[in-house]
Amino acid sequence: MHESDKTHMNLTGVFALELATRSEAEIVIEFIVVLLVSLIGLSGNFLVLLAIFKTASLRNISNYYVASLSAFELIISVCISIFLPEVVLKGKWTFSDAACQFEGFVTAMLATGSIYAMALIAINRYFLMVKSNLHRRYFTKRNVYISIAASWILAANFPLSYALQGNGFMFHPGKGICIFDVEKLNLIHAFLTGFLNIQFPYIIMSFCYFKIYQKVKLHNAQLRRPETGVASGNRISARDIRITKILFAIVLAYTICWAPFYVIDLIGLFCGQFFAPRLVYVFYSIVVGSTAAVSPILYGALNRELRVEIIKLLKTLHCSLFRRATVRIHVTELNMK
């Protein structure tokens, strides 16, 4: 056995021991945080998807891309809620190796897919607001469906290429999840897939939102000078500006949440899988997991149309549950008589 492999095994054992010997207070705090992140991600993304697909006025091109992002996040939340609470409570991985491979593959794919979805949202907003004369030509329902399907397929490029090299996903006792082993990554492969899945989409998003910013700035300047006039084809609605601001806020929040992932795993490429204290990896998992709760909170709370429909859905659900409870109580009382 190589010296590096022995060191890796020793560090894995040290972190596994730390996970297994946490105090009750640590377990309770970690469990509550994980549970909250899971519940917000599950309920928030489910409500966003339900509102979009049940409301005709919300079924538009822009919201199809938002729905795709919510679908990525919903499945991430499902994975988190299935595995992570159990690990936090039991202090070890209690599932099979097949489950570990599944979690590692799926979460890597979905994380990549969520970045692709944000890039598609940015491209759509760019054409809608900057190249509005081309938007209807390119963003037909057929093309939107194709681009969304392509983002889901291409999202598997990193975990698939990693697995095809004979690498398996490993349980990281610091992070509490199954993830790729950074020490087994080929540097060229890591930087190529990193550029394709992270840097390149962010370059696209930065370009699109910068151009939108310039367009809105010019539009506002023209509005302040009525004598210059604004051509009808170049008018930007206040609603489109508001939605674009919300979507940009989501990208910004995502960037903040994913920053620990990029930084910690990049350092791990050179310094090893276990270079930091356990609390750093706990922070890593919680912050990265919270990305699934970002867009439903921001988009659901700040988008008035979507917020109204979500409130309607919640009221309907509440009334339905109340009626069922009332009927059950009435039936119970009749049976007792």
Image: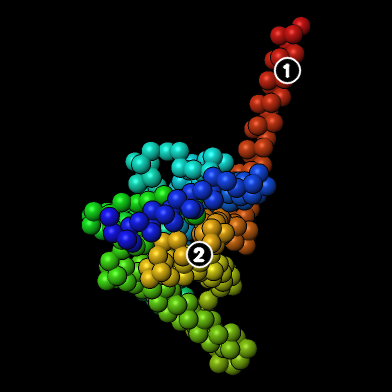
Q: Which of labels 2 and 1 is toward the front?
A: 2
Q: Closest to the observer: 86 or 43?
A: 86
User: Residue 119: x, y in percent?
Assistant: 41, 68
User: Residue 83: x, y in percent?
Assistant: 48, 43
Dot 1 lies on which element? helix
Q: Is residue 327 above or below residue 75?
A: above
Task: Answer yes or no: is residue 285 visible.
Answer: yes
Which tag, 2 or 1, sits closer to the chain's start? 2
User: Residue 78: x, y in percent?
Assistant: 48, 45
Amino acid carrying mark 2 in the image? Ala
- Lateral position of residue 163 relative to residue 218, left or right: left
Residue pointed to by mark 1: 330
Dot 2 alpha-carbon crowd within 10 angstroms: few under 14, some 14 to 19, many 20 or more: some
Dot 2 lies on which element? loop
- Lateral position of residue 62 relative to residue 296, left or right: left
Q: Closest to the observer: 103 or 229?
A: 103
x 38%, y 57%: residue: 8
